[in-house]
Amino acid sequence: MKRYPLLIAMMFMPLLAKASEVTERLDLTGSWVGIASVLLFFVAYLVVMTEEFTHLRKSKPVMLAAGIIWGLIAWHYQSHDIPHLVETALRHNLEEYAELMLFLLVAMTFVNAMEERNVFEALRSWLIRCGFGYRALFWVTGLLAFFISPVADNLTTALLMGAVVMAVGGDNKKFVLLSCINIVISSNAGGTFSPFGDITTLMVWQKNIHATNGIVDFWVFFALFIPSMVNWLVPAIIMSFSVPNEKPKAGGEMVGMRRGALSIVALFLFTIALAVCFHSILQLPPVIGMLTGLSLLQFFAYYLKRRGEKTHARNGDVENSGNPVPFDIFRKVSRAEWDTLFFFYGVVMCVGGLGFIGYLSMMSQTIYGGWGASNANIIIGVISAIVDNIPVMFAVLSMMPDMSVGQWLMVTLTAGVGGSLLSIGSAAGVALMGQARGTYTFVGHLKWTPVIALGYASSIGVHMAINHSLF
């Protein structure tokens, strides 16, 4: 028995040797590895921005760039006999991505299940049959987008409300254009005051779970409700005067929800509550609560299957359109937006690699050290109008500047609503440009950018005024 301590010590000798190796990161910002990595990310993102014209899915270039960037870093560290530091950093980035990916996968599965049960289609047909005037419909679709996007994502919300606008607007291009702009602004604004409303908001919440500075609790995000509302209302009020004061023709068949639709909605709300409770009460990652809720959805899907329910094709789908198959929740998992999830992987890994090289700390010192947190956070929002807010927010979270809760809320607000300044600044805008092709355009949106910028500035001012105790 006395030999066992010696054997155990011998087993741990390699680990002790590794611990004694150099653990300092190399500053590669001025090396060819660093410069090549920046150029790779820049080129990959240029390809992403041309997706509308090339029809090349946005996940492909960033995934390729991520692999090459980390390969270059690993090769350089291997040549300096520091192999394990890169592996540790890479695993840390993978862990962050895994939590967010599983969280989003569950949310997407619920949204797809609700869509298949005709929840969104029933809402659309009801709005069309109500006989609202153009101005009333302008406000109704904007208001619904504002309150649906905190639960669903801004992309799904924009497509749903956009379908309503085009179904009712018909040939009235001015109404369709103004309503699409209004929907983009309201869906982006609505997603900022809820941890579930947007990927960037979710990133801030999950990142700050483990942070030691400026922890943003779940309920603190709702302090952004009024600033978000202001961000939408200011441009909406101004644009509403240009909406035609006419009344479209009502009509169309009433679409009903399929069996189990309201139960799935209730399960989704319960799953969100589970995620909050798992974090707030049990101090566990919120994704555990989401996955637990997904298991409940699976049991409910089994119940629907036993009752003889079938999976019906969605709009635009041809699979099983003539022969519905038994209801299966894993078909909803397969319908998740995998291109978005893999795009998110590529972005997280690319930005993580650039951070490991040293660029994020350098940027943090320049922006947050030299300009101050408030000015930096305002600029972050403007940048997100050109560059997707996911890499922008991940870069900020990788920097982890020492900011108050109020400043963390401000960057959450600006990164979320800054994308409304241009039609290409958010997934909602890009999607509507495709859905209302020829009517809602980049130039048409650009004409109203000064008005949208007024709402952007007003929301920041209101946040600093009513939430000053958080700064």
Image (tube, rainbow, N blue to C red):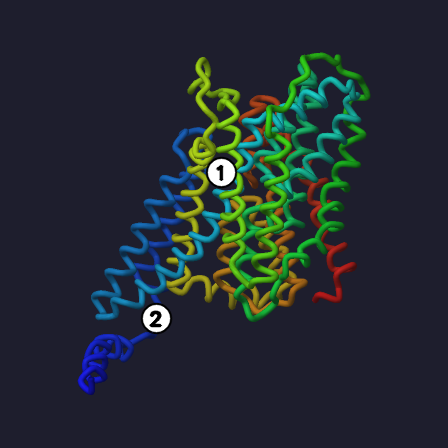
Q: Is residue 261 above or below residue 235?
A: above
Residue 204 visible to the viewer? yes
- Could you classify mark 2 by the number of other residues whose Cα lies within 10 Å: few (under 14), some (14-19), or many (20 or more)? few
Q: CA distance from mark 1 to mark 2?
A: 45 Å
Quadrant that contains the N terminus: bottom left
Where 4 sits versus 97, above or below? Answer: below
Quadrant in the rendering for residue 15: bottom left
Q: For the residue marked with disc 1, what is the amino acid?
A: Gln
Between 226 and 42, the one nearer to me in the picture: 226
Q: Nearer the viewer, residue 442 or 10?
A: 10
Task: Residue at 48% x, 33% y: name it.
Answer: 302
Left or right of residue 36, residue 170 in this image:
right
What mark, if any, has residue 25 been given in the picture?
2
Q: Earlier in the sequence, mark 1 or mark 2?
A: 2
- State the mark number for residue 107: none
Q: Residue at x 50, y 38 (%)?
A: 299
- Horizontal and vertical percent position of residue 350: 39, 52
Element type at marker 2?
A: loop
Specify the quadrant of the image occupied by residue 169.
top right
Residue for badge 1: 298
Residue 320 horizontal/vertical position (percent): 43, 18
- Residue type at mark 2 is Arg
Name the element at disc 1.
Answer: helix
On screen, residue 434 versus residue 29, left or right, reads right
